[in-house]
Image (spheres, helix red, strand yellow):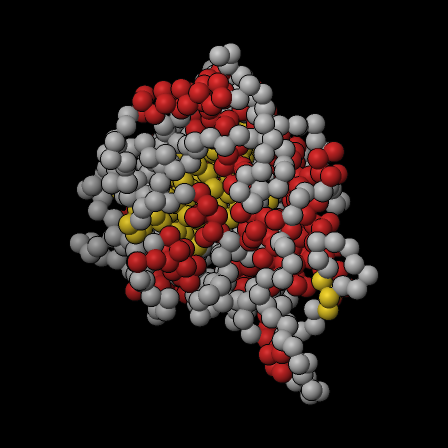
Amino acid sequence: NSRRGADLMRTVLTVLLLAAAGGQCCTIVAVGRKASADGSVMVSHSEDAEGAGDPRPRRIPAKDHKHGEERVVYATDVSYPKNPRKLGTIPQVSHTYAYLQTTYGMMNEKQLIMGESTASSISPIDAVKASDKGGTAIFGIQSLSEVALERCATARCAVKLMGELAEKYGYYQDEGTPTGEALAVGDTKDIYLFHVLPDSTGKSAVWGAALVPEDHVAVIANMFTIRVMDLKKDDQFLASKNIESEAILSGRWKKGEPLDFTKIFSAGEYGRKYYAGRRVWRGFSILAPASNLPAEYNDLRLDATYPPWIPCSGVVPNDVFRVHRDYYKGTPYDLTQGLIAGPWGTPNRYLLADKNPLGAAFERPISIYRTVFSYVAQARGFLPDEVGATLWYGPHTAHGTLYTPIAVGVSDIPPALGNFALDKLDRSGFFWAFVAIQSLAEARFAWISSEVEAMQELLEKGSMEVQAAADRAYLKSKDIKDVKKAYFDNAAYLNARIWAFFDQLVMRYADGFIRGDKPSTSPGILGYPKAWLAGVGYTEELPPEETGLTAPPTPLIAQMPEPDYVKAQLSVVADQREAPQLQGARVDAGAANSPATGSSLPALLCGIVIGAAATALVAAAYVRKQVSMRPDHLYAFWEPAVEA
């Protein structure tokens, strides 16, 4: 016990000093099916990887395997380019499912979805080694998530399988990284929270899983969140065989006491106080403002300030996008305020070049400049798996990205998302466009962020329409090629549009001036806000007119016609017609947020098909039109015209 206590003390100290060396500092949001507006289950993830990692998603195809085959287990590798290290093998199964993958597994063809967040634990950093580094463990969280997506169709299957594999073959963490991992794992009905850490022998693992109530939401931000586990309720809680013995060995628990997973096995927040808890508070306050949870606390591990989940209703993907884009704007912790935000209110707080870069006295927002990508995985059990499983994927920083849909049933990834160069600026990919826009925005954040937010609203609304039309097309034709065409055309259009947007931003805001919707030889002077000038000690007489931080007085770029050269880049010539969207259709008759009609799933699907046919009867040919604020852009759809 004394040795375990010494190890625990060393863990607490090294978590503060080494957390940033290789840790993946990520945020998860999980939304139960009765907490969503349409019966979707949603799980999100942000990969805040400190400049490392590959932002290009990949699709691993389904495969049949011969009897006696072995499945190779590779070391966790979050870097780019990858350096594969074989750690061992396990017996292969006869068939593995197709799935989408980046740093970790994200979603499979059975609508199993996942999000990851590294956490501290009582296992000392670097005490447990991988099998090729002098230890015996072969599983890290990367391989666990991938094997679960290959083999499981439900969240319960996934958490049990990952736990059992970690127990049997050993679990380790990347060098220099806090040793716990937290996942939210969902399917079309359920969400489980899953926590894992190395055991005291270094040859096995301790893990626990808890079922999230279906009308609740959960937020995880680099710290365990599961609290008291009643292991007699095996329909709600699952755990490793050694959980009680390891809890006793920790010195934090005695038989008969409540088994609080976080209190026993967490080492608390890493980096600094509020690094995790403030993000949990903010996520809950956005999704459920009436929750009235406190933003301040003493010890997050001991005090259980925030429950693992809270009640919620009516959540749509855009709400989760908003959580991931948050930097505390409008709260007492607003990162756009103060002299350190510069004259134009940037929320970015860069890492300090010292031994504890995460320990700087800055608020840690959910949206952060070093995000490689984020996503919202949506499982829609009221639709076939091929289209029901949708990944809303956003490369680079969440507050600057566009979330773009990918269907798991499509065999390829749109090139703008998955096939572009990382060793040079490549205009064929979204990622570099968002890097360019955010780099430009840093100089005039208060104004350019207004431009970005308007463009996000405009184009993501269009992508929601794309998703609805692709769903209708697949229900009619049962041909996944229709879905592929929808999402590939959408991604191609968005890539051209977002690069044009960057060009327009340069034209409008270059060199400290502002230009309107037409070129001018006498552009307006932006200057500096008076408060900032006074704050930095400007001693001359202040200018008579205030330069504010509000949106620019000219029309936002999103409200202007798109450039002709965007249209010229695309062969698509038809615009999406307005039609009822699946987004927001409430299909769970038993849910509290169901419509009064309580329509059944067959009736809903029948209505969708009939509605699409009726729409086609009205239109004898494709129609181009302006929708709301939307410029004349070019989504292509192929609902075949039906002869009257």
Question: From where the camera sits, is residue 224 visible?
Answer: no
Depth order, front residue of 113/252: 113
Residue 509 image-quadrant placement:
bottom right
| Residue at 72%, 42% in the rendered image | 563
Q: Is residue 501 left or right of residue 371?
A: right
Position of residue 549 measured from the top left corner of the image (x, y, whole percent) = 59, 68
Position of residue 117 measured from the top left corner of the image (x, y, whole percent) = 46, 49
| Residue at 46%, 68% in the rendered image | 333
Q: Is residue 74 left or right of residue 148?
A: right
Q: Is residue 26 left or right of residue 492?
A: left
Position of residue 5 measured from the top left corner of the image (x, y, whole percent) = 37, 63
Question: From where the camera sits, is residue 346 visible?
Answer: yes
| Residue at 68%, 64% in the rendered image | 443
Position of residue 600 measured from the top left corner of the image (x, y, whole percent) = 28, 25
| Residue at 57%, 51% in the rendered image | 454
From this viewpoint, which residue is outermost toward the right? Answer: 521
Q: Classify 39 as above or below 616.
A: below
